[in-house]
């Protein structure tokens, strides 16, 4: 079995010798998976690789390069593919016209459907070939969903790099960068990028930090080690920005309780321990009178 260092070197060599590839995410990926894949995409692009991101599930994330994730596999080629979300009936027709040397495509929405959001339109090229395929946190090729089901021929004979930390991973790649004891997939990708001598920037570091933070439940997971904190510190030094935490307003009862708790002990000791208006000293005196024996004397006036 190869050591972790040898696996990293082998993976780095495969990528170094390749020009183009795709990074595939499984269906319904976690934030750590998206962060790791997007960071790897940014790093490989920075190294001059022609690479694309793909996931058959809809990805909604504020992570850097998450908007580059496409629902289908796109390879470097000469055929431009324009892609946008579609549901049955959402599009009535697609037309085109040429004006001022511009080719215009017109998408008419279906009845009672919203118009197409221009921010959801993606572009890519197909008709070409890829040198490598990277999967991130896929337990098997079938866990990629439609990405694999609709492109099985594309996967044949390719350099397949399997990056994962899941216990159920089936080691299906030609290179299996699988570390089952590590606390996050983002850490694996960080080590790979460092093996490729990729300079980390703010975007890459932020993605990896947020993936690490999510996977470790904000560094409270039992899998967290000293190495985890060293990785977090390294990413922060490399420019990582923490995700903004939403401030949740305190409930009224909680505010009232905190105000009471904030009082000094002196003020609490000086206050009566009973309810307002109660006088426990008077009650004690009344109790003592009640316990004394009572002598009933007849009224002389009534006897006469």
Image: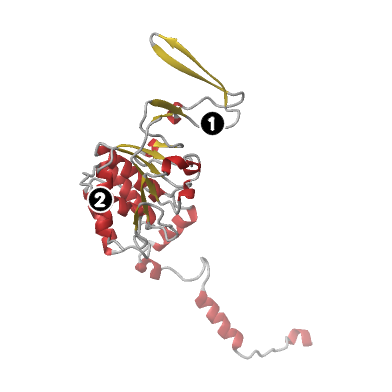
Disc 2 secondary structure class = helix
Q: Which residue is mark 1?
A: 86
Which quarter of the rendered picture does the N terminus lie within? bottom left
Locate residue 23 relative to residue 236 in the image: left or right.
right
Comes first in the chain, label 1 or label 2 = 1
Relative vertical location of residue 35 with respect to residue 52 in this rendering, above or below: below
Residue 66 placement, left or right of 4: right
Specify whether residue 265 is in view.
yes
Q: Position of residue 241 (x, y in %)?
A: 29, 45
Image quadrant of residue 120? top left
Residue closer to the observer: 223 or 284:
223
Tell me residue 282's x, y (percent): 53, 76
Label 1 sits on a secondary structure element that is loop
Residue that label 2 marks: 235
Crowding around mark 1 (Cα neighbors within 10 Å: few <14, some 14 to 19, many 20+) is few
Q: Is residue 116 above or below residue 241?
A: above
Q: Residue at x 30, y 45 (%)?
A: 206
Q: Is residue 163 left or right of residue 257?
A: left
Quadrant of the rendered image containing residue 302: bottom right
Q: Which colour scheme appears in the figure?
A: secondary structure
């Amino acid at each position: 079995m190869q050591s972790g260092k040898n696996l990293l070197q082998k993976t780095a060599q495969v990528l170094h010798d390749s020009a183009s590839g795709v990074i595939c995410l499984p269906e319904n990926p976690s934030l750590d998976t998206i962060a790791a894949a997007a960071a790897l995409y940014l790093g490989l692009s920075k190294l001059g690789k022609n690479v694309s991101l793909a996931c058959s599930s809809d990805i909604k994330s504020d992570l850097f390069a998450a908007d580059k994730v496409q629902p289908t596999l796109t390879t470097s080629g000469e055929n431009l593919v324009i892609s946008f979300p579609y549901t049955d009936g959402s599009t009535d027709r697609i037309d085109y016209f040429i004006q001022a040397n511009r080719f215009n495509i017109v998408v008419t929405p279906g009845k009672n459907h919203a118009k197409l959001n221009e921010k959801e339109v993606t572009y890519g090229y197909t008709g070409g070939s890829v040198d490598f395929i990277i999967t991130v946190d896929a337990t098997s090729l079938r866990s990629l969903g439609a990405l694999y089901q609709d492109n099985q021929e594309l996967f044949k004979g390719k350099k397949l790099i399997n990056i994962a930390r899941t216990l159920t991973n089936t080691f299906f790649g030609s290179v299996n960068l699988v570390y089952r004891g590590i606390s996050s997939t983002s850490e694996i990708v960080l080590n790979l990028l460092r093996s490729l001598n990729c300079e980390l920037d703010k975007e890459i570091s932020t993605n990896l930090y947020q993936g690490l933070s999510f996977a470790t439940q904000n560094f409270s997971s039992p899998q967290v080690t000293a190495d985890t904190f060293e990785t977090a510190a390294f990413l922060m030094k490399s420019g990582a920005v923490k995700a903004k935490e939403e401030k949740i307003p305190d409930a009224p009862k909680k505010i009232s309780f905190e105000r009471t708790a904030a009082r000094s002990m002196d003020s609490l000791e000086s206050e009566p321990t009973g309810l307002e208006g109660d006088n426990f000293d008077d009650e004690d005196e009344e109790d003592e009178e009640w316990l004394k024996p009572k002598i009933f004397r007849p009224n002389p006036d009534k006897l006469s």
